[in-house]
Image (tube, coloured by chain):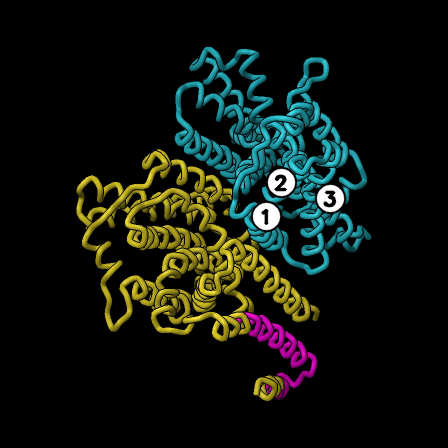
Chain colours: A yellow, B cyan
Amino acid sequence: MNATALHSEAVVSDETRASAKSAGRRFGALVVRLGAIAAFAGIIFYFVLLAPGFTSTFNLINVVEQSAILGVLAYGMTSVIIGGGSDVTEGGIDLSIAANMGLCAAVYATLLSMGYGDMLSVLAAIAVGMAVGALNALAVVGLGILPLLATLAVLNVAAGMELTLTQNTVVGASSPLLGFLVSGSFLGISALAWALILFSALVIAVFHYTSFGLRLYAVGGHPEAARAAGLSVPFYVSFTYVLSGFCAAVASVLTVSRLSASTPGSGELLLSVLAAALLGTVFSRRFVPTMGGTLLSVLFIGLLVNGFQLLNVSSYWVNGVQGALILLVVAITSFARGSEGSR
Amino acid sequence: MSVSANDSPKMNLRAFLAKYSVLIAFAAIVIFFAVASPTFLTLANLFNVLVNNVVMLAIVALGLTIVISSGGIDLSVGVSVDMASMVFVMLLAAGYGGVAGVGGGLGAALIVGILNAILITRLNISPFLATLGVLFIGQSTQQLATSGGQPIYLTSGYAADQFNAIARTALFGVPTPVIVLVVVAVAVHVLLHRSVFGRYVQAMGAQPGVAWYSGIRVPRELSLVHMLCALLAGVTGILLSATVKSYVPLSGNAFLLDAIGATFIGTTLSRERKPSVIGTLLGVLLLAIVKNGLLLVGWNFYWQQVGIGVLVFLVLAASFGLRRASH
């Protein structure tokens, strides 16, 4: 069935382009992309067959819940990569996003434990997250510092501030909002899972179904052309960093609800966030970062961790498999790009 | 750069500030801490900073300097540090001699470098992603090899003697680790700034396409670059284990951010933002002195991290911002 689909795709492009070469190139890229997706599907299929209870509704909702925090953070990272261009050393990247989440969680939990209400605490966490994002925007857009370096410095500041605030301890927190996020449910789906579903719908709508999103892609894809077309490049790039900070704040509320506390060590999430945002590119036709692709790779990472747990495989394998997958996907992508780029 | 005679002194001042922002920051910080803490400028304290804060970070950062000069990045330096440290300590624990341990440790680090080299030059993966993948795999490997991250302590007996032979000896009153750093620094300086290989590396960093067309064997030279970086990180791994007489899994990652920071602080010294050995050493010294100074004036570890972050941010802002303004 795949073969005919591929064949018809090739035929269509042959007719429209009237060029066998371009058809072959497209065919190659498509095969490569399907190959990567088939690898993903193969792993899931393996779990479906062998992991007990993997496909139960309860378990799948559990996976979505567990993926909520990583997902929201990965959207922030993806937005920065979309707006800043996907060149990894010069392009957009936000290394401070996980540390920012830690800081927001600390602020949120500390304010709650001091007796302030949900409203004020959440607003404070969001304000802090967006302030850190604005600092990144100032450094990258205003001062022209390389994103990699600017967000690295901000990472240290945010992580240090979290430590000074919590003295490296666990700050317990409870509130009506947290209680609702943990135990509330609607249509049999828990509030945490809903949070991911709604947030995903929102970012996918904004980035892929509005002219604003299209302009963000234009700014990231070719800043000079975007400027020539009259777009305010600094505004759009700044927006992505502030949005990334906002995502960190939202994720911080989710993580405090899951753990009933803010805990040190949130910086370790950074690598998974990067992996999710970068792996997501394989789900797009032109290997660009997309919100939908990021969601799929976040769920895939969630299923991977979950499948390993069900199979009783040591969780120490998860990092390694994740790393191997990044390498596989990227090698395949660079191969496909290489065959596309050889004009 | 057409500058009218009228505002040229101002422009020159800006360019001057941009160029020497690191040195100015460095001087200001030394003066500040010398006034704030009476013990800061004592010989004993400076020596302590050199041995405990500078040597290991500097060796990692020098390896990274080579990679960044070639236009790449190595996020897996922490893994190289850890692998060298792990194999070294495990071999000693199994009763092998010091020479075998050091050789095995450096070999393990070199394997990380070779893996990076294959991924980057054969599979055409960008250095950032290739080394990110290796970082993940390296972390898993360590967790699996130590049943989840159990440290290995060898504080007495034969192994401790071997550790002391590396970390606690001195030649003409200079501790062995410092001698190692001097040798490494001179070697990397000659390699990067005075050799044909260095020319190739700089060319690849400046214009990869041109480097390829002018007949430089880019894959070969890039492989060497990544192997050298991993090897130097391995040297730090050996020194680290010998100093703390143990192997603590995943401890090498602490070097990554500081080493990147130091190297890029060093790039602000040159107009073209090229990394250099002297710049990197200066960056490492800056970070080390700030850490030590903040400790002496009574800031705890947590505030130190904020302080370092703010400082790096300000140095980068001054350098990038002033340069942009002077153009």
Where residue A210 appears, x then y in whole percent? 38, 69
**Residue under mark 3: which chain is it in?**
B
Residue at mark 2: B86
The tag on residue B145 is 1
Q: In the rendered image, is residue B323 in sight? A: no
Q: Position of residue B207 (x, y in %)?
A: 70, 50
Cα distance, mark 2 to mark 3?
Answer: 31 Å
Which residue is rendered at x = 52% and y = 31% of the image?
B14
User: Of the residues under marks 1 and 3, which one precedes in the sequence?
Assistant: 1
Vertical placement of B127 versus A289: above or below? above
Tell me, yes or no, whether dots 2 and 3 are on the same chain: yes
Say the numbered circle drawn on residue A191. none
Element assignment for label 1 = helix
The spot of residue B74 in percent (x, y) is: 62, 46
Q: Are marks 2 and 1 in contact (CB under 8 Å)?
A: yes
Q: Amino acid at mark 3?
A: Val
Residue A15 on the magenta span? yes
User: Measuring 18% from the left and 43% from the top, which residue is drawn there?
Assistant: A116
* A185 horizontally vs B10: left or right: left
Disc 2 element: helix
Residue with the mark numbered 3: B201
At mark 3, the secondary structure is helix
Work out whether residue B175 or residue B151 is closer to the camera in this orientation and state it.
B151
Badge 1 and badge 3 in a common chain: yes
Please identify the dominant SS of the magenta region.
helix
Q: Say if B281 sits above or below A183 in the image.
A: above
Tell me where the magenta segment starts and ends, as one range.
Answer: A11-40
Camera-side mark, 2 or 3: 2
Identify the residue shown where x is 50% and y is 72%.
A50
